Amino acid sequence: MRKWTVAGVVLLIVVLAGCRQSPQATSTPDLEITLDTTTPFKMGQTELVVTLKDAQGTPIDNAKIEVQGDMTHAGMKPSLGSVDKGTQGQYKIPFDWSMGGDWVLTIKATLPDGRTASKRIEVTIPTS
């Protein structure tokens, strides 16, 4: 009986570890998504600047960028933003940090040919 319990726990750990995604993982390796973090984030309405490039570093302008921000604790409504035009690979997305604390941004890029890429970024918004 003990042997089966240990085997079950080991199997569960392996399965859960395989499901875990790196916070900086990109689903399509030939697209690079970056978030400009040079300006400190603060609560309230803001503009996120996302840059999209191909594998050679060439900016991509004709993608749709969607951002979903989720607080790390349960019970909060997500903040959403999107834009479908970029200039020199930069996309400016209206966004609302509804409160201070720890957030996870999921940025999704969809190219006109249907390819997609996504990236998760952890962000902390100061409470004051």
Image: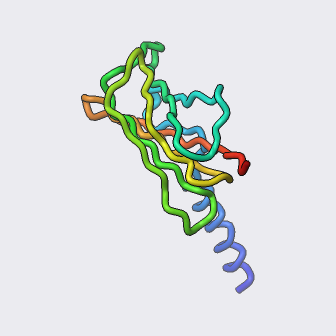
Q: Nearer the viewer, residue 27 or 123?
A: 123
> Is 86 on the left or on the right of 2, as rendered?
left
Q: Is residue 124 above or below residue 50?
A: below
- Residue that appears at 58% across and 49% down: 104
Q: Is residue 18 visible?
A: no
Q: Is residue 52 visible?
A: yes
On the image, the x and y values in percent for residue 71 come to 59, 56
- Residue that appears at 69% across and 79% down: 5
> Is 43 on the left or on the right of 114, as rendered?
right
Q: Toward which corner of the image does residue 88 lie, by quadrant?
A: top left
On the image, the x and y values in percent for residue 89 come to 42, 19
Q: Toward which corner of the image does residue 16 lie, by quadrant?
A: bottom right
Q: Is residue 57 above or below residue 37?
A: above
> Is 4 on the left or on the right of 62, as rendered?
right
Q: Is residue 49 above or below residue 73?
A: above
On the image, the x and y values in percent for residue 4 come to 67, 79
- Residue that appears at 32% across and 32% down: 84
Q: Nearer the viewer, residue 53 or 1?
A: 53
The way the protein has been coloured in the rendering is rainbow
Q: What residue occupies the far bottom of the structure in this picture?
A: 1
On the image, the x and y values in percent for residue 45 come to 52, 43
Total number of numbered labels?
0
Q: Is residue 23 above or below residue 54?
A: below
The quadrant of the rendering that contains the N terminus is: bottom right
